[in-house]
Amino acid sequence: MEQKLIDIGAITGRVGEETQRALQRAVKGVGYLTSPSPATGCTPKDLLRARGPARLFHYRATEAELYRVPILIVMATTNRGYILDLAPGQSFVEFLLGQGYDVYMLEWEAPRPEEKNLDVYDYALDFVPQAVADVKAHTGEPDVTLLGYCAGGMLSCIYAGVHPENIKNLVVFTTPVDFQQMELFSAWSDKRFFDVDQLVDTLGNIPPELIYSAFDMLRPAARLVGQIRLWDNMWNDEFVKSYRMFDRWGVDALPLPGEYFRQMVREFLWENRLVTNSLTLRGQRVDLSRITMPFLHVVAEHDHIVPRGASKPLIGLIGSQEKEEMVLKGGHVSIAAGANAVRRMWPAVNRFLAERSV
Amino acid sequence: MQQTQCTMRAKCGDEMAEKPNLDPLSLWREMLGQWERGLNSVANQAMGSDEFSRAMHQVTAMSLRMQQTVGDAFGKSLQAMNLPSRADLISIAERLSRIEARLDEMAAAQATPPAASPTQPPRTRRPPTAE
């Protein structure tokens, strides 16, 4: 039997398809340049407190019945919170609301020049506990689940390591604890070459361009290739929408207070105090073994920002009996906000929290 | 006989039994992905070196020194013109922030915390397995 190695029909079809796409690229390319970015962070919410760079929001419930224990999401200090509320159907916040949780988010604004003296203590042991207290007062419930993303997870763990009695459940994802395993950041902040004092004393707050460039340098080809792929997929409205949302968020980095940055470099990158359980903030010792509430750490298998080595020791440092580490497919951002998050991370977090939120 | 040949090809995973990928664009997209991974890998190795770190921070340090010098020069010019510098404005802003913080403390001591809306749904939900 003769098998056709070349299917003329299929090739003709492909040529036709690509020709159509090429025409659409030209037309939609113009539209891309002239149209605004898609709206993000659209789930209705109310501002409960604004203090310094901290903003505590309460998302309006969508269900007629809620779980007893509310969730307080603590966002990373370098980026905006709308990554967890990108768009209808692609929003972790919307998902949690739909599952019946009462959702709050502690996110950050750019610190003002006069806020350059804010440090890790202010974020982890002032803003976070204030938010926890506000959530308890607003709900009338004595219990709160803390859910931290990346550096937000780090702040949550620090707070829980000092005041474990204030938290019912602790969930973190893509959270670093061993900063020397973040090899490139470690190399770039090598104390032999990097004078952090000169940088902070000259600039005050660390500008967002420096933060955003550091993340970009982890994958230097990504931006160029991303733009090539964007052009290749310009005919695909869903691809373009997703690209615009993620791209906008990626460049929408926040500046960091100077003292916070100085402390992160000295005590976390250079001295690695968190993983050695030797971190002390204004006399208060951070002891991760004091964390004894139910704990979940979701790790991204292909995380280029927080490599596996940087997050792996966390589960061993936590003192909880009920603790779990889950490694899921995805990258640092896509695990929580990508198209597959709805099938992977979100249901996993829901399964963990549902029975622990009554 | 023909059935046996087809079965043998399937078992051996013979690629000739599958149609070759003659889609040049698909091949180009694969190559793009491989090129990206390769370039990232090479760049990461180079950027993780002491030489790169030293060079990057030498450039940064020079830029910071220039910024400091320019800032000092402007500061002196503003002082000569009896105008406030950026540092002066930041200092005023810090004092305002401290005043605001004290006002917040006083207000917090007097006021009640943000209270829940009376129209909040009941907190009686159970997980699906419990129902």
Image (spheres, grey):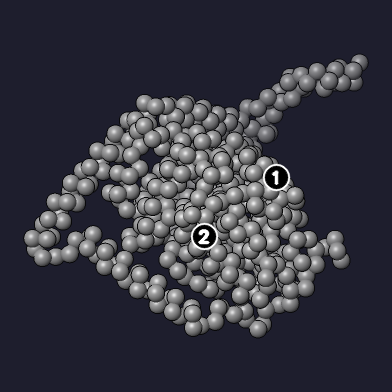
User: B90 above or below A197?
Assistant: below
Towards the viewer: A352 or A253? A352
Number of callouts in the render? 2
Q: Residue at x 67, y 79 (%)?
A: B120
The amino acid on which the numbered mark 1 sits, given as a three-letter code, is Glu
Q: Nearer the viewer, mark 2 or mark 1?
A: 2
Mark 2 and mark 1 in contact? Answer it, CB < 8 Å.
no
Residue A133, x across and y down, in percent: 58, 70
Image-quadrant location for residue A255: bottom left
Residue at 51% x, 43% y is: A273
Q: Position of residue A319 (x, y in %)?
A: 68, 48
Residue at image location 64% in from the left, 58% down from the top? A164
Q: Which residue is mark 1?
A: A325
- At label 2, the amino acid type is Leu
| Whether labels 2 and 1 share one chain | yes
Q: Secondary structure at mark 1?
A: strand
Looking at the image, residue A225 lies above or below residue A288? above
Indicate the position of residue B131 as horizontal and vertical percent values: 87, 66
Which chain is home to disc 2?
A: A
Quarter-of-image position of residue A98: bottom right
- Neighbor class of circle 1 (other Cα within 10 Å; few <14, some 14-19, many 20+) is some
- Decide if residue A149 is in sight here: no
Q: Residues within 10 Å of mark 2 (few under 14, many from 20)?
A: many
Give the residue pinned by disc 2: A125
Q: Mark 1 — on which chain does it sit?
A: A
